[in-house]
Image (cartoon, rainbow, N blue to C red):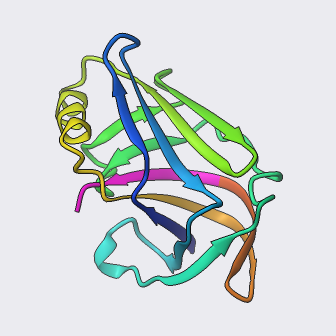
Amino acid sequence: MLTTIKQSDNNVKYNKQKNRITVQALTTDKPVEMGTTQTVDPNYQTFKTYELDNNVFQALKDNDNLCVMLDNNKDSNILASIHRGNLTVVVNKGLYGLSIEVDDKPIMQEFIKLVQQNKVKSVQIYTDEVTSMNKLIEKIGKIKAISINTR
């Protein structure tokens, strides 16, 4: 069983000079929605509102298999991955961010257009290591996958 944590109104920007997309995936200054799921299919996910503890990312472990997909489609919409070498994770107090190096995959050009048109609605992380109590997420241990959602 996976836990999915979703946050809306994320800061996603394309920097043409650096050929990079930056994503503010989770930040402690906004509420999130959390639910459990067995699949990345959003049709089978229900969420409840939570807050993120200021130290939620302290126990976060690296994941060499981490990937970022577009719209929960893990079959054909992989934007970036640690394995492919075009994904860097940035963890700062209160922020979990991503830096995606633009490559020549066709999905990347589509994604750049979506970012430029401000079409990103939310970012979801999938984890099997989360600690929460009374509507507060205290700790996230390992992030398995991330989805950037436009719908």
Q: What is the span of residues highlighted in magenta in the rendered image?
A: 143-151
Q: Quadrant of the N terminus?
A: bottom right
> Magenta segment: does it hold 147?
yes
Left or right side of 103 for 62:
right
Q: Quadrant of the C terminus?
A: bottom left
Q: Say which residue appears at 28% left-offset and 78% top-offset.
A: 43
Q: Is residue 22 above or below residue 151?
A: above
> Magenta segment: does it hold 60?
no
Residue 130 placement: quadrant: bottom right
Coordinates of residue 101 in the picture (x, y in percent): 42, 21
Q: Say which residue appears at 43% left-offset and 46% top-offset.
A: 11
Coordinates of residue 74 in the picture (x, y in percent): 34, 50
Left or right side of 146 for 64:
right
Q: Is residue 9 above or below residue 48?
A: above
Q: Say which residue appears at 51% left-offset and 50% top-offset.
A: 25
Kindly give the residue lying farthest to the bottom in the view shown.
134
Coordinates of residue 90 in the picture (x, y in percent): 64, 35
Please name whichever residue, 115 or 82, is drawn nearer the observer in this view of the structure: 115
User: How many marks overall?
Assistant: 0
